Image (spheres, rainbow, N blue to C red):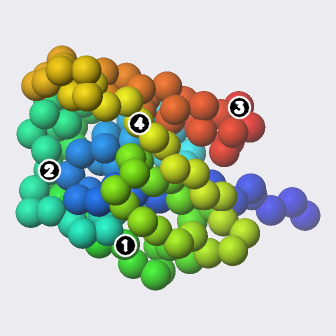
Amino acid sequence: MSTAPKTPSVLFVCSKNGGKSQLAAGLMNRLANGTVTVHSAGTTPGKSLNAQSVESLAELGIDITGEHPKPITDDVLNSVDAVIVLGTEAKVQAPEGTRFEVWDTDEPSKRGIEGMERMRLVRDDIKARVQKLYAELTGS
């Protein structure tokens, strides 16, 4: 008797859970289409989503308007296969045996690029990383 393979799960974390981690979660949800359980959270959740993050995903047909910044919970932290921290602000301790990565994402503002142009570059950097992670988590 074979058992169904466990659905891999990932937690994307940034400091406010309004921008980068929401981008990553939205992109992974679209790519995985239910084959990966996706969570996002912030170490110090903000009040709302970054409007440019929402807009940059809408350009790809991904709607995250129903999302909101959330804190990290022990339940989620202890249940996921991978913890991915986006950027260098958020500090998280992943449980032993859990895949842990810090994605030092592109920061176009350091090059004087702001607004939607900045957000699209950030989104596309995260998208490439999400595609690689998806392939690794699912073996596809």
Query: Who's the residue at 52% across and 32% down the image?
Result: 129
Q: Which residue is mark 3?
A: 140
Left/right placement of residue 84 relative to residue 58 reads: right
Which of the two discs, 1 and 2, labels the residue nearer the N terminus?
Answer: 2
Based on the displayed image, in which of its 4 quarters is residue 13 positioned?
Answer: bottom left
Between circles 4 and 1, the one closer to the viewer is 4
Which residue is rendered at x = 53% and y = 59% of the image?
Answer: 83
Residue 62: where, in percent of width, then height?
27, 32
Label 1 CA crowd tier, 10 Å (few <14, some 14–19, many 20+): many
111 or 59: nearer the viewer: 111
User: What residue is pinned by disc 2?
Assistant: 49
Q: Residues within 10 Å of mark 4 (few under 14, many from 20)?
A: some
Q: Is residue 11 left or right of residue 16?
A: right
Please determine whether, in this image, residue 136 is positioned above or below residue 95. above
Name the amino acid type tagged 3: Ser
Q: Earlier in the sequence, mark 3 or mark 4?
A: 4
Specify the amino acid type for callout 1.
Answer: Ile
Question: How packed is label 2: few (under 14 Cα within 10 Å), some, or many (20 or more)?
Answer: many
In the image, is 79 to the left or to the right of 52?
right
